Amino acid sequence: MVTDGDWDSIQPAFSADGKWLAVVSNRSEDRKENRLSDIWAIELATGRAERLTAGDGNYSTPAWSPAGDVVTWVGHPITEKYGPVTLDDLFIYDRGADELRGLLSSHDREPGNSAIADARYGLPNPTPVWAVDGSAVYTMLSDAGSVHLYRCAVDGPAAPLLDGAQDIQSFTISNDGTVAFAASTMAIPTEVFVRRPDGTVEQITDINRAMLAGVELGEIREVRFESDPGVEVHGWLLTPPGFNPAVRYPAIVEVHGGPHGMYGVGFFHELHVLAARGYVVLYTNPRGSTGYGQEFVAAALGDWGGADYRDVMAGADYLASLDFVDSNRLGITGGSYGGYMTNWVVGQTDRFRAAVTQRSTANRISTYGTSDMNMTYNDWEFAGTPYDNPAHYIDRSPLTWVKNVNTPLLIVHSENDLRCPIGQAEELFTALRKLGKTTEFVRFPNESHGLSRAGKPAHRVERLERICGWFDRYL
């Protein structure tokens, strides 16, 4: 046995000479009450463990250089100002020189793939990959909805190797520098591509051709509009297949989860389904989203239902300004944090004619004690604990404002959801029914927080039919 103790050791990475093993582990004394993770190097001959990080943050995905003298990893210290949303960096640590450097510190973007989609096939963020000669480290980087592949020189700048409007999900690099990568676009689900050393890119699979044959997809355009003065919101507008600009369509605002994720340029099945039912779909990245820099992602800390809400409502204003949108037939939906925002919105305004809340929270105090992550996460997201700052938790809980809800609201929730427990949906439904509001509650047995992405196929179809049916009825 290489490791012991009552802690986890994950993401093992062996040095090239087989003498060392790097792992990710939280071995702090209060590890059950914090979200720290460190990189540890274990000498296999002796079992001696050496902590390479400072015990001050979240670090993961270690990888050894080909020579075995340098280790790289992704992560961040939990800073006083930004806490758990401090942007990750790609670090390299020279063990001999005891020197630690960040290779992406000047980019104000986060390594890895932060894009949210429902057709990703479970591909994980890959470990940073070393060039065979040890001159550079390759990693993905999330930027304004796109996910690029960067080459980060050990002794020079970091620059994109693959950029443009695509969602790179996984990659590997051969000894001659050829890159194989899985990626999707707005119109093409995930396929495998190859980038040759001369820079040419070739798609080498076409597994989705039969599925898309005879299917007409709506067109997607990139949009930007102002929210608060000087604040630009970035997103995309999906129009129905056979779009006619002379027709006034009902429209739906989609709010992503997180809040520290991002909608992007990858294929999103749910959005295309809604468009195929005749809806214009607006999906944006309000404040709190990743991909737009440190200040933007941190803008929602302690202010859920504040600046982010104004950005969502600016999206409704943008839709209403379009000649082909019927401003009296707007809907809203979202899951997880997007479900929270849906609940919040319908308690603050009657602007939307119908709403669907998915895997949501409504009572932030009870969420704090029952979610699988909120005991530490909420300390930052809601400016302290509910015991120290109860007024804020109450004020920013959608359940507090449930008497104001006049929008017909469908509640969709999985019974095995540990992130947003089923009790959140039950509390909201009970209140709405008690108050005589228009609502329905759809419960999915034996499903988790990931129903929309990884649920049973029959349940995923049923979920989409329920969502579309609700909007068909009330929009």
Image: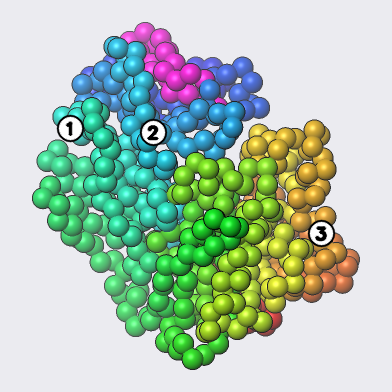
Going from the N terminus, do you reach mark 3 or mark 2 first?
2
- 265 in relation to 63, above or below: below
The answer to whether 324 appears left or right of 357 in the picture is: left
How far apart marks 2 and 1 lie (CA) works out to: 24 Å
**For discs 3 and 2, the disc positioned in front in the rendered view:** 2
Q: Amino acid at mark 1?
A: Val
Could you classify mark 3 by the number of other residues whose Cα lies within 10 Å: few (under 14), some (14-19), or many (20 or more)?
some
Q: Amino acid at mark 3?
A: Trp
Q: Residue, x 59% and y 32% (percent of image)? A: 81
Q: Earlier in the sequence, mark 2 or mark 1?
A: 2
Q: Which residue is mark 2?
A: 105
Q: Which residue is situated farthest in the front direction here?
A: 229
Secondary structure category for the residue under label 2: loop
The boundaries of the magenta stretch are: 36-55
Residue 120 x/y as whole percent? 41, 57
Q: Which residue is mark 1?
A: 132
**Position of residue 141 in the picture relative to residue 357 (left or right):** left
- Residue 401 numbered tag: 3
Name which quarter of the figure residue 414 lies in: bottom right
**Coloring scheme used:** rainbow
Q: Secondary structure at mark 1?
A: loop
Q: Amino acid at mark 2?
A: Ser
Q: How many marks?
A: 3
Classify 10 Å Cα crowding around label 1: few (below 14), some (14-19), many (20 and above): some
Residue 223 point in image, percent of width and height? 46, 67
Q: Is residue 133 magenta?
A: no
User: Residue at the spot x=59%, y=46% of the render?
Assistant: 299
